[in-house]
Image (cartoon, rainbow, N blue to C red):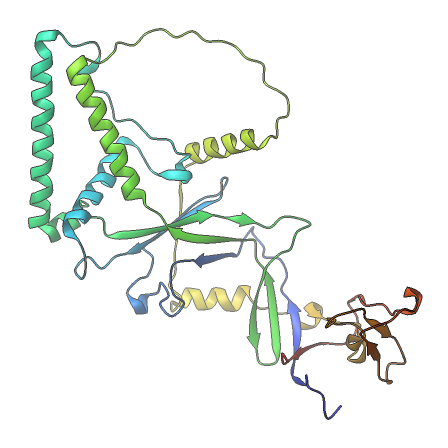
Amino acid sequence: MDDDDDPVVDEYDVFITPELENQQQIHLLQYMNRPPELPFTERFGSRPSQLRTKQQSGFVEVDVPLDIHNNYNRQAGVRWGEALRKTKSYGQQAWGLSSGFERVPPPRQANQSGAAAPEAQPAAAAAAAAAAAAEQNDLEDYVLKFDDANEKGHVLNTQTFGGQLLHVEEGKANYMVGVYRDKQLHLTTLNGMVQLRTQFNHLDACTQLDAVARRREKEAQDGSKPAEPRAVLPTIKKAVDNTPAIKTKQLLHSAHEEKWTKVNYMDEDMVESYDAYNERLFTNDAEAAKLHAASKHARFLDFGPSHGGKRKAVVKHAHEPVNISDESDESDDEVGDANPAIETSSGHVDGQKEG
């Protein structure tokens, strides 16, 4: 119709790409605290330096370089960098939820095998105080020799983003990514998506070191407790227990036991990224993958949102207008089918301008 308020402005043929071979997957990474006009790319000096995943528990972390020479607190950066370095030396590879909230304890010293003698306690306390003073001197020295300390791994020079991957579940809505080529729209099913938020691993590392320092101070004063035998009580576990508490406990245990898998990260302007884009997001057999709609243009006029009151749709011949009224007290038998099925047959999908 010439006076249509919602005209068809363009039309596209829609294609669905086949499933990827060799168990290749496509995941969508959403950075929730990053404005879209500042992507993490080489052009903006923020290309991620490392991407790692825990495939079983689904955790993902991305390290992005920080500008440590502009608007950067060197004292805090050195303190946080040292906390991460020391806790990693204990064997800690993850913090927070991605580690199951577990903390790896530092290795026990040789003189901590039993309770200290009373005359040795003052000397142990003095040694602990001297170690704390030496550590503070080291931090100050790292600040004075900042660039050298950064090269040796004593400075927090990356920002970590993390989240848990949501996999595609059968029977639920799935997301797809679409790309255009001329008058074609190619859709590819996503295998999962993750919302990445800023992680505060450096603060967790500082808390862990504070707990270690308090424990060592207490042991220096009271002496470490010797290892004692513990009673083991056998329990009978249920064959199947899917309560939320058990599922959460299993997830945390799995996250703590699972190791990180490092993934190669390619910048969006690299040749490898363009090759993957053209290879995985388009279908080569266009005719076989073309999406068709059985409904014609007039059929879509048979249903739509109501603006109040009851709605009645009278289905007429495909070339005749459809009458829609807000109020009707007639039987429901005369109301037309408001949900026509979409089948794979001849036709195409129209892109329409929003009213």
Q: Residue at x 27, y 43 (%)?
A: 202
Q: Position of residue 21 (x, y in %)?
A: 58, 55
Q: Nearer the viewer, residue 221 or 238?
A: 221
Q: Quadrant of residue 59?
A: top left
- Residue 103 in sight in this render: yes
Q: Position of residue 146 (x, y in %)?
A: 11, 51
Q: Farthest residue toward the bottom?
A: 2
Q: Is residue 295 above or below residue 192?
A: below
Horizontal side of 298 relative to 160 (left or right) equals right
- The N terminus sits in image quarter: bottom right
Q: Residue at x 84, y 72 (%)?
A: 312
Q: Is residue 181 above or below residue 86?
A: below
Q: Residue at x 17, y 53 (%)?
A: 73
Q: Is residue 139 above or below residue 29?
A: above
Q: Is residue 323 above or below residue 212?
A: below
- Residue 285 in sight in this render: no
Q: Position of residue 327 (x, y in %)?
A: 83, 72
Horizontal side of 50 relative to 238 (left or right) equals left
